[in-house]
Image (cartoon, rainbow, N blue to C red):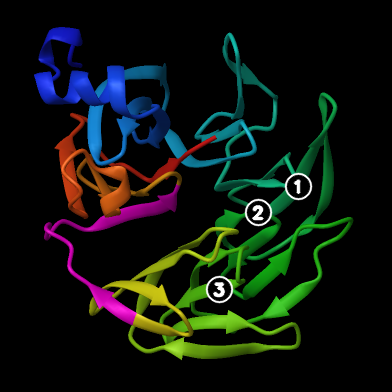
Amino acid sequence: MPADDDIALDEKRVYGEKRDETDAYVASALGVTRVEVAGDQIGRFSLARQCKATGIAGGGGRLVVGTDEDVLVGTDEGFAETDFGPAAAVGLADGTPVAASPAGEVSRLVGDEWEQLGTVARPRRMDGDLLATRDGIYRVDTGLPALGAGRTVRDVAAAGPYAATADGLLAYDGEGWERVAGGDCTLVTAADDGRAHAVSEDGLLVRRGDDWHLQDIPIDAAIADITHGESLYGVTANGSMLVYATADLTPDGQAGWRSRALGVREAVGIAVP
């Protein structure tokens, strides 16, 4: 992992004088890697926890990591174990850690104890209080009410809500799901401020107004996950971090992409607390 003297001088100026830092966390087979980002600049990164991570979720200042042994909750001192066992997917529902086991048992962390909510078939990914499974989408509440969306759901975004499916990108209107963009979709992320992106067989989709458009991305590697913070962050399966920043967040006033290899393998997720 790089030390301070590995950071370019212009990056040091950005960190020290122009922009506040954002800490993004990448989950991979190596563990959890903390990456400092400012605008479009990717700075120092280091291994925060060694483990085999299976998923990660962040928001509201909290961080939850699923591993092949347990669910970890980020603290000021590091990561606390919770005695959940192996996790297939993790999330934060209204700030409360939630997790699904490989067998489909879904629970939420109440105090120091896990409260089981129900069982689903083949949990895939979580975002907020939504869980994407082999049989569709469920809301993680006092129970697990089904929201439909069919059997081809790969990912879900609670802000929207949106679902990435083999049949296209779907949006939920309170009663059902409607396709808003075509093509086989694997990932989707959305923020409360209206930003939304998805990864489809055609490339990266971005929502502008009521429509979805393709956005160029300067990398051919498979994207493992995308999320929003100050900028748009992504990670490829082979461990390269991506940042897309708007013009007002860059030192030269030019919107665009940056990427940096993190030296990790089998990346599965990226999150901002």
Q: Position of residue 184 (x, y in %)?
A: 34, 81
Residue 242 belongs to the span the image colors magenta: no
Query: Looking at numbered disc 3 in the image, what kind of residue is underneath it?
Result: Tyr
Q: Is residue 197 in view from this perspective?
A: yes
Q: Position of residue 27 (x, y in %)?
A: 40, 36
Please report whichever mark, 3 or 1, sits nearer to the chain's N-terminal start. Answer: 1
Pointer 1 with pointer 2, Cβ within 8 A: yes
Please report whichever mark, 3 or 2, sits nearer to the chain's N-terminal start. Answer: 2
Residue at the extreme right? 142
The Cα–Cα distance between marks 3 and 2, rounded to whole angstroms, is 12 Å
Say what secondary structure mark 1 lies in.
Answer: loop
Residue 216 belongs to the span the image colors magenta: yes
Which one is in front, 245 or 84? 245
Say what secondary structure mark 3 lies in.
Answer: strand
The numbered mark at residue 128 is 2
The numbered mark at residue 162 is 3
Magenta stretch in the rendered image? 213-228
Task: Please state if 12 lies on the left or on the right of 137 as rendered.
Answer: left
Which one is in front, 123 or 231? 231
